[in-house]
């Protein structure tokens, strides 16, 4: 059985923390840089990030596709944005973006932490849903790296 606990990667983006935060905290823009998130919409009449606000995300990996409804846990413009997603059998993961001013740009750290583990049934579903998920830790690590690379290109106006 696989295990997940936490992971994080960091990159430098040549833009102010508030600029990078604005893109990340507008979850409807997540598909522009995330390799797994295909769609995000605000729920409950929300139109922006506030603690307690929910959104619906559709994720895809290989042939597997699923929905989840994360809740925003931190929304501090220019500093930090985080949300928690809980799925049946798949535990609870907290995704976090930290933004630190560095010279004329921003040091962005994307991370996840498992706060409630995935069950055995959850791992069976994850692994059966996509051959790509046989090593979910590696897939997620590569996804963070790709997200940060795409976010950098998006913010700095470079082609992907």
Image (cartoon, helix red, strand yellow):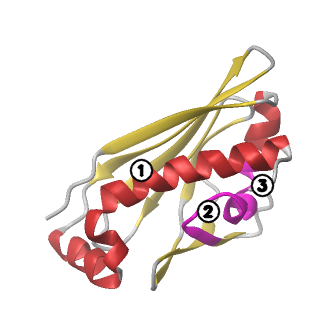
Distance in Å between CA atoms under marks 2 and 1: 25 Å
Other residues around mark 1 within 10 Å, as few (<14) / some (14–19) / many (≥20): some
- Side of 96 where 102 appears, left or right: right
- Residue pictured at 80% horizontal, 44% vertical: 155
Distance in Å between CA atoms under marks 2 and 3: 10 Å
Furthest-top residue in view? 103
In which quadrant of the rendered view does residue 74 lie? top right
Distance in Å between CA atoms under marks 3 and 1: 27 Å
Query: Which of marks 1 and 3 precedes in the sequence?
Result: 3
- Residue pictured at 34% horizontal, 55% vertical: 138
Q: Which residue is mark 1?
A: 141
Which residues lie in the magenta part?
Answer: 23-38
Percent x, y for residue 95? Answer: 49, 48
Percent x, y for residue 85? Answer: 46, 60
Residue 79 covered by magenta stretch: no
- Residue pictured at 25% horizontal, 56% vertical: 117
Return the mark for residue 48. Answer: 3
Return the mark for residue 122. Answer: none
Percent x, y for residue 118? Answer: 25, 63
Query: Which of marks 3 and 2 precedes in the sequence?
Result: 3
> In this view of the protein, can residue 32 be seen by the observer?
yes
In which quadrant of the rendered view does residue 58 lie? bottom right
Q: Is label 2 in a helix, a strand or a loop?
A: loop
Q: Which residue is mark 2?
A: 54
> In this view of the protein, can residue 83 be seen by the observer?
no
Other residues around mark 3 within 10 Å, as few (<14) / some (14–19) / many (≥20): some
Relative to 90, residue 63 above or below: below
Percent x, y for residue 41? Answer: 71, 71
């Amino acid at each position: 059985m696989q295990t997940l606990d936490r992971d994080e990667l960091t990159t430098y983006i040549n833009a102010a923390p508030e600029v990078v935060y604005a893109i990340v905290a507008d979850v409807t823009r997540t598909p522009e840089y995330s390799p797994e998130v295909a769609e995000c919409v605000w729920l409950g009449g929300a139109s922006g990030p506030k603690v307690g606000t929910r959104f619906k995300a559709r994720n895809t990996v290989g042939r597997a596709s699923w929905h989840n409804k994360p809740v925003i846990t931190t929304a501090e413009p220019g500093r930090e944005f985080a949300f928690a997603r809980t799925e049946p059998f798949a535990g609870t993961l907290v995704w976090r973006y930290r933004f630190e001013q560095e010279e004329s740009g921003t040091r962005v750290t994307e991370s996840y932490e498992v706060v409630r583990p995935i069950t055995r049934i959850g791992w069976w579903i994850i692994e059966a849903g996509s051959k790509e998920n046989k090593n979910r830790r590696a897939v997620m690590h590569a996804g963070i790296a790709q997200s940060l690379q795409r976010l950098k290109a998006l913010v700095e106006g470079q082609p992907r």
